Amino acid sequence: MSAAWTLTIDQGGHGTRALVFDPHGHEQARAHCEIGVHRHGADCVEHDAAEVLRSVDEVLAAAIAASPTCPERVGLATQRSSIVCWQRSTGTPLSPVISWQDRRAAALLAKCVAGRDDEVRTRTGLIPSPHFGASKLRWCLDELPAVQQAQGDVVIGPLASFIAQHLTGGPPVVDAANAARTMLWNVDDCDWDKVLLSWFGIPAGLLPATAHTCSDFGPLRDHPMELCAVSGDQSAALFADGEPTAGDVFVNLGTGAFLQRVAAVEQRPARLPRSVVLQDEAGARCVVEGTVNGAAAALSWWRAERQLDAAELRAALPGWLEQRLDPPVFVNGVSGLGSPDWISHFPSRFVGADATLAEEAVAVIESIVFLIARNLDEMEQTCGAPDEIVVAGGLSRLSGLCQRLANLTATAVVRRDHDEATARGIAYLATASRDRWQPSPTSAFVPASDPDLRRRYDLWRRQMP
């Protein structure tokens, strides 16, 4: 009897994808639908919740139609720290999707956890930040009349639960990786934390029930398939080529850049999160994680500032990175500084003489490399030097970025030769044929001496907190 094929849904910050994989991990079909990103001032970043659901339905139907074999199993991965409120009985959204990039509730967060940072870290593995969901959920309860008026028929929680209920029509349920990014989930108890809920004034009954990453989430309402795995985008990406190895650092380069290294229980760096990537019968599995908020988001910010065409920039950027340029230094505070600084608002600026467009673009890319290197330095203090840096995601297609990362860190960079780490990872978790899964081919970038890059990195570090 042949093994089942798997369809995966990857709902990201700029669009939704569905991909179909055979039992060996080979992609057989895909569909994509862009979604709008709505920014209101410097702090508010939202998506239309109904549009997100329409995009899920559209790519799901298109990928099934394009697949040579009908998939039987489904995996779902979403933006981890994005939240939404919806009607329990109908699944109707009562709020926008508030993006992980959103920082509107920074002051509210400071009030709720004042002086309790260490206890938050002990309970959740996270360092308090408005990027996580707790303060956003509290803001919705305080500020949105539709949420207040729904009374006993409201659910608030991670985007993953909202989409999963839409797909299955079942009760609201959420996996551990997405629940943990609310900053309300106890990493040791593997459930909602009563103390944190009391600090934020959030009734436990408003939140979805939590479940293991790979569970029977139920059959899809409109298709003869079972939802078998739910996770976050970054936590799923870690499994793109099967079980991750402890000695490597995995970097997924998308809207943000996220560094993950499999963590032993005793490895808890002071300024980096201990993030949940999977929960099963044995408990929660964690990584030490670094977060760069402004990766592709920084490039998009700069492109908008210079009023450049997106397609033209994508075409020109690889060549610019190959040229021998002397770019300025870009201090990248797009969407705030993530780890290890955790500063919600930090001004972005170029340091140096006036530069050409090409030089500025290269400076933005180098700022991403610098932020990754800063996080690697922090991670190394607890976990030791990595064997390799494994990169995936859209920006990893830029060989000039990968080579600079290898040169600056004096560590080999290995690029997975696929551009859908999240989709592959959630497919691996959802498949019934993990023993057949085949890793993707890779490209390697060997470290080389680059004193000019090191000089710019040293200048950049002097501009940082």
Image (cartoon, rainbow, N blue to C red):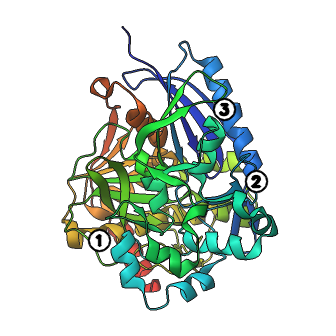
**C-alpha span from label 2 to label 1:** 38 Å
- Please provide percent x and percent y for residue 188: 31, 65
**Mark 2 secondary-structure assignment:** loop
Give the number of the disc on residue 48.
2
Q: Quadrant of the C terminus?
A: bottom left
Residue on which disc 1 sits: 377
Look at discs 2 and 1 and give the one toward the viewer. 2
State the image quarter where residue 206 is shown. bottom right
**C-alpha span from label 3 to label 1:** 40 Å
* 354 relative to 293, above or below: below
- Please provide percent x and percent y for residue 245: 23, 47
Q: Residue furthest front?
A: 152
Question: Badge 2: few (under 14), some or many (20 or more) residues near its Cα, within 10 Å?
Answer: some
Disc 1 residue type (three-letter) = Asp
Residue on which disc 3 sits: 59
**Mark 1 secondary-structure assignment:** helix
Between 273 and 456, the one lying in front of the other is 273
Q: Which residue is at a point 41% across and 68% down the rendered structure image? A: 370
- Please provide percent x and percent y for residue 385: 20, 63
**C-alpha span from label 3 to label 2:** 17 Å
Residues under numbered marks 2 and 1 in contact, where contact means CB atoms less than 8 Å apart:
no
Residue 430 visible in this rendered orientation of the protein: yes
Disc 2 residue type (three-letter) = Asp
Judge left or right: residue 72 versus residue 163.
left
Residue 322 visible in this rendered orientation of the protein: no
Q: Which residue is at a point 39% across and 26% down the rendered structure image? A: 25
